[in-house]
Amino acid sequence: MSEATQIIAIDGPAGAGKSSTARAVAERLGFAFLDTGAMYRAATWWAVHNNINLDNPEALAENTRQMHLEMFEVDGVQQVTVNGHDVTEAIRSPEVTSLIYRLDQNADVRQQLVALQRQFGEKEPTVAEGRDIGTVDFPKAGCKIYMDASPEVRAQRRLKQLADKDIIEAYEEILQAIIERDTQAMQRVESPLCQAEDAVRLDTSDLNFNEVVEAIITLARKDLCL
Ligand code: DC
């Protein structure tokens, strides 16, 4: 089996729990973890930082070419730097989150980030999560999962995450934002979010975190002959 197939590709909509489960699966199996959403977030932050006109596709692509992105872990926490700036927190801000769709539809930007993602995944066995991992990044990934949960369940989980940080938001507003992001991701022209034909659908609505991790590990062991 070639090294390139030692990829666990996890796709799905925002809030399905991909990141935390992908990280846990990577740790359990001794695989590297690749959070591709962080790369789109970093490129968006870099565009805003440089006052790039988000309506100008060439300027966005050129700006992304000038981005020097580093992602590494310190004490199990992912750190992200862009051209020397620590953007670990900034890329999760509501401003960046609300602007990513202006950039993630840009074919040139996507090609650049996909190239970086492939370089990463070709180096070592990797759990990669995003929206187009099984369809575009690694169509030959040995294990593909499409993680989903109903918008209502995802909104409830988000509500709880925020409440744990003492942030109170209205359930209806969170639900509406989730539905909007789903629509943007599924209807965009470039690499729309969709389930790869050979991906296994995992509906996590009625599963807890450990159950999801176990389900993915069981599947990966079978698919990748681990
Ligand atoms: O997973 P996330 O919420 O951190 O991703 C941030 C955004 O990046 C999300 O709105 C869609 C985009 N994205 C993408 O277009 N393709 C990917 N492979 C990963 C994320």
Image (spheres, grey):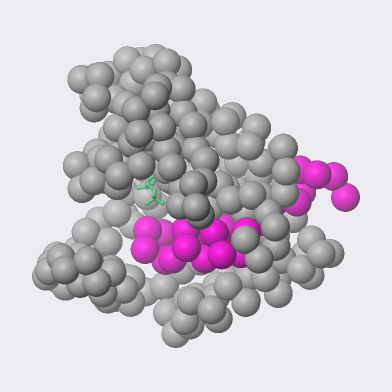
- Asked if residue 7 is among those painted magenta in the image, a careful observer would answer yes
155 left or right of 16 in image: left
Q: Looking at this view, name the residue that lies furthest to the front.
A: 75
Instruction: Identify the image quadrant of residue 8.
Output: bottom right
Q: Position of residue 168 (x, y in %)?
A: 12, 69
User: Is residue 53 visible from the viewing direction of this image?
Assistant: no
For the record, the magenta segment spans 1-26
Instruction: Identify the image quadrant of residue 124.
Output: top right
Q: Position of residue 162 (x, y in %)?
A: 22, 67
The residue shown at (41%, 32%) is: 81
Q: Position of residue 53 (x, y in %)?
A: 22, 20
Q: Looking at this view, name the residue that lies furthest to the right.
A: 1
Closer-to-camera residue (89/3): 89
189 left or right of 54 in image: right
Q: Is residue 121 above or below residue 33?
A: above
Pick the quarter of the image with the C terminus: bottom right
89 left or right of 201 in image: left
Q: Is residue 211 above or below residue 109?
A: below
The residue shown at (66%, 41%) is: 121
User: Is residue 31 visible from the viewing direction of this image?
Assistant: yes
The residue shown at (55%, 81%) is: 211
Instruction: Identify the image quadrant of residue 83.
Output: top left
Closer-to-camera residue (164/116): 164
Q: Position of residue 174 (x, y in %)?
A: 20, 65
Q: Looking at this view, name the residue that lies furthest to the bottom.
A: 206
